[in-house]
Amino acid sequence: MSESKPTVVLGVSASIAAYRAADIASALIQRGYNVYCVLSTNAADFVSPLVLATLSRNPVLQSLSQELPGVPGHIFLAETADLILIAPATANIIAQAALGLAPDALTSVLLATRAPVLMAPAMNSHMWEHPATKAHVKTLTARGFTFLGPDVGNLACGQVGIGRLLPVEQIISAVIQHLEE
């Protein structure tokens, strides 16, 4: 961890739960963390980059061509991060990370970083329980990724089951625990 306040890179993937990233960014800032947000290709369809930039007090990385202070943004964030939190983590982002694919800014940060990675999944129960998703989670866990949830409850599709994003407070507690180890 750096000597200044810890830097958390908050990765946001394209899930209906992406709106909760605003609460996560705000809670991390209130606790004194430096926060940068990075969006997957379609995450801006679910949460406004302007909201995340305002709450995090930093520019939001949205593309591979974007620079953050004069260097490729994904490399800057990968090297600056004390911790990376992906919340919400969709089945797609989990699969891309497990396979080492880097088609966008978020997956490129994941491939380039040496920082610990926490993933807070959010998806339909069938997607979470699919053998491919389970295999990808197992692969990432073996590589040192930590999964936070998912929770059981009401899902956006109208079903009740596993796949719900953990409550923000639980996610923040996990971040604090990892940064204070």
Image: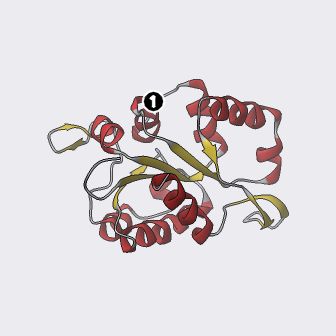
Name the residue: 46% across, 54% down.
179
Q: Amino acid at mark 1?
A: Leu
Report which residue position mark 1 lands on: 111
Q: Locate residue 131, reporting x and y percent.
A: 82, 33
Nearer to me, 51 or 141: 141
Callout 1 crowding tier (Cα within 10 Å): few <14, some 14–19, many ≥20 = some
Q: Locate residue 101, reporting x and y percent.
A: 52, 26
Q: Quadrant of residue 166?
A: bottom right
The answer to whether residue 153 is above or below residue 4 is: below
Q: How many marks can you see?
A: 1
Name the residue furthest left: 70
Q: Locate residue 88, reporting x and y percent.
A: 58, 55
Q: Is residue 60 left or right of residue 156?
A: left
Badge 1 element: helix
Name the residue: 59% across, 25% down.
99
Indicate how the structure is coloured in the image. Answer: secondary structure
The answer to whether residue 18 is above or below residue 94 is: below
Q: Is residue 142 left or right of residue 59?
A: right
Name the residue: 51% across, 58% down.
175
